Image (tube, grey):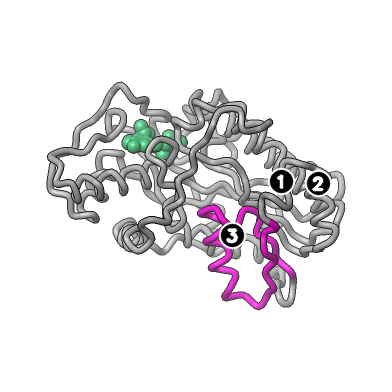
C-alpha cells in the first residue's frame, strides 16, 4: 500500500533552500496542494510558540523538513553553536508541532555527516552511533542525529508516521555560492567560472584532493523524497546516494571541464580535508525501487547553466557568529 498525496496540503519547511526548492519543483507534478512558507519575519522556526501557532492555523497534512542551518566544512567548524542550536530547535519545534497538529506523514532530511568519521564504506544505515564523528562537522551531525531520534521516538511513543532520509553530498540549482561557507560543488563551480572569466592561470582547491565524496543532483534527491513518502514507513533512517564516489581531484577536473577553464589546479594543503571518504550504501532505497538517474556530468551541466542564468541573484549565505540570539 502506498501513501496517497492526493488533495493533501503539503508543507516543505525550508522551501527557499536548495533541497526545499527541489522538493517544491518535484511536488508540482503531484496531485497535492502546496503550502507557502510563512517567511522568516512572520515565523521564526526556532521559536516554539510561533511554529505551533502557525501549524495549528495552517494544518498541513504532510511535511518535508528541509529547514535548517547548513554550510560547508569551514562554516560548520567556525560556528558550531549556531549549527547545533538552530538545527536542534528547528527540528524539535516542527516535529513536536507535527505531532500536536496530527500531520499524517513527515519526512526529515539529515545528512551523511551523521556517520562516524571512520565508518565502513559504503556506509550502511547501521553504522550510526558506532564511533566518533568527524570533528569539523560534529555540531551539525549531533543535531541531525537528534532529528532522527526524534522521529523514531514520536513513532514509538505516539505512533506518528515520521521517517528520515540521509542524503549524500548534494549540488544543484539554489545552492549557496558563498566562497567560504559553501560546500565544495558551489565553491569550485564559482571559482572555476571566475578564473575562466579573469583568464587566470590557476584555481585553488582546498586540501590534498584525495578525500572521496559521493555527489547527488538535488532533483534526484527530491524524487527519492517522494518515493520514500509513498513507499516507506519505518524506524530506520534511509540513505540516499548516487551509488559511486570520486576524489576531490577528480571532481575538480569534472568542474574544470564543465566550465571550460584551461589553466592549472593547485591544492592548498593548509585547508583541512575533512572526512577521508563518504560513500553511502544505498541498497535499502534501491530495494524500495528507487535509484539516482542523473549522471555527474549531466547534473553539473544543468548546475552550471542555472548558475549562468542566475548571475546577480545567487544565494550567498554568510554565517555570522552568534546569530542565534
Ligand atoms: P564535507 O563533505 O562535509 O567535508 O563538506 P565540503 O563540501 O565543505 O568539503 C568536501 C571536500 O572538498 C573536503 O575534502 C574539502 O577539503 C574539499 N574542498 C576543496 N575545495 C573546497 C572549497 O573551496 N570549499 C569547500 N567547502 N571544500 C573544498
| Picture layout, residue 294 above or below residue 175 | below
- Mark 2 → mark 1, Cα distance in angstroms: 12 Å
Q: Is residue 15 magenta?
A: yes
Q: Which residue is mark 2?
A: 96
- Identify the element where label 3 is drawn: helix
**Of label 2 and label 1, which has the lower sequence position?**
1
Give the camera-side residue of 55 and 121.
55
Quadrant position of residue 16: bottom right
- In x, y percent, where is residue 196? 19, 49
Q: Which residue corresponds to the image point at 51% horizontal and 57% vertical from the top-left?
A: 221
Quadrant position of residue 31: bottom right
**Of label 3 and label 2, which has the lower sequence position?**
2
Q: Which residue corresponds to the image point at 62% horizontal and 60% vertical from the top-left?
A: 228
| Picture layout, residue 304 above or below residue 116 | below
Quadrant position of residue 206: top left
Q: Is residue 36 magenta?
A: yes
- In x, y percent, where is residue 12? 65, 59
Looking at the rendering, the stretch of residues picked out in magenta corresponds to 9-38
**Of label 3 and label 1, which has the lower sequence position?**
1
- Residue 219 in sight: yes
Give the camera-side residue of 118 and 271.
271
| The N terminus lies in quadrant | bottom right
Q: Which residue is mark 3?
A: 225
Name the disc covering residue 45, or none.
Answer: 1
Q: Which residue corresponds to the image point at 18% horizontal and 54% vertical from the top-left?
A: 260
Can you tell me whether the CB of the residue at mark 2 lies under 8 Å from the nearest atom of ligand 1? Answer: no
Amino acid at each position: 500500500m502506498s501513501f496517497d498525496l492526493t488533495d493533501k496540503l503539503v508543507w516543505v519547511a525550508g522551501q527557499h533552500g536548495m533541497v526545499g526548492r527541489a522538493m517544491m519543483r518535484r511536488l508540482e507534478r503531484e496531485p497535492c496542494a502546496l503550502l507557502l512558507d510563512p517567511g522568516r519575519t512572520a515565523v521564526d522556526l526556532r521559536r516554539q510558540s510561533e511554529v505551533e501557532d502557525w501549524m495549528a492555523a495552517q494544518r498541513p497534512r504532510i511535511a518535508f523538513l528541509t529547514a535548517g542551518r547548513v554550510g560547508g566544512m569551514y562554516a560548520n567548524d567556525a560556528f558550531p553553536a549556531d549549527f547545533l542550536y538552530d538545527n536542534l530547535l528547528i527540528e524539535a519545534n516542527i516535529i513536536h508541532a507535527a505531532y500536536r497538529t496530527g500531520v499524517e506523514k513527515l519526512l526529515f532530511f539529515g545528512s551523511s555527516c551523521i556517520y562516524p568519521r571512520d565508518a565502513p564504506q559504503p556506509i550502511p544505515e547501521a553504522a550510526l552511533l558506532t564511533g566518533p564523528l568527524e570533528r569539523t562537522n560534529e555540531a551539525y551531525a549531533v543535531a541531525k542525529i537528534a532529528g532522527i531520534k526524534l522521529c523514531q521516538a514520536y513513532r514509538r511513543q505516539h505512533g506518528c508516521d515520521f521517517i528520515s532520509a540521509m542524503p549524500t553530498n548534494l549540488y544543484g540549482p539554489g545552492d549557496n555560492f558563498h566562497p567560504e561557507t559553501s560546500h565544495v560543488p558551489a565553491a569550485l563551480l564559482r571559482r572555476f567560472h571566475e578564473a575562466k572569466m579573469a583568464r587566470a592561470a590557476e584555481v585553488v582547491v582546498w586540501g590534498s584532493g584525495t578525500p572521496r565524496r559521493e555527489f547527488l543532483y538535488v532533483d534526484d534527491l527530491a524524487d527519492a523524497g517522494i518515493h520514500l513518502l509513498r513507499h516507506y514507513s519505518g524506524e530506520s533512517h534511509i540513505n540516499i546516494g548516487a551509488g559511486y564516489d570520486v576524489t576531490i581531484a577528480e571532481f575538480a577536473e569534472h568542474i574544470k571541464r564543465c566550465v571550460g577553464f584551461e589553466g592549472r589546479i593547485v591544492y592548498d594543503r593548509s585547508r583541512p580535508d575533512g572526512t577521508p571518504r563518504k560513500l553511502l550504501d544505498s541498497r535499502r532505497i534501491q530495494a524500495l525501487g528507487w535509484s539516482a538517474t542523473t549522471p555527474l556530468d549531466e547534473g553539473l551541466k544543468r548546475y552550471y547553466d542555472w548558475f549562468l542564468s542566475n548571475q546577480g541573484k545567487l544565494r550567498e549565505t554568510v554565517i555570522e557568529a552568534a546569530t542565534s540570539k
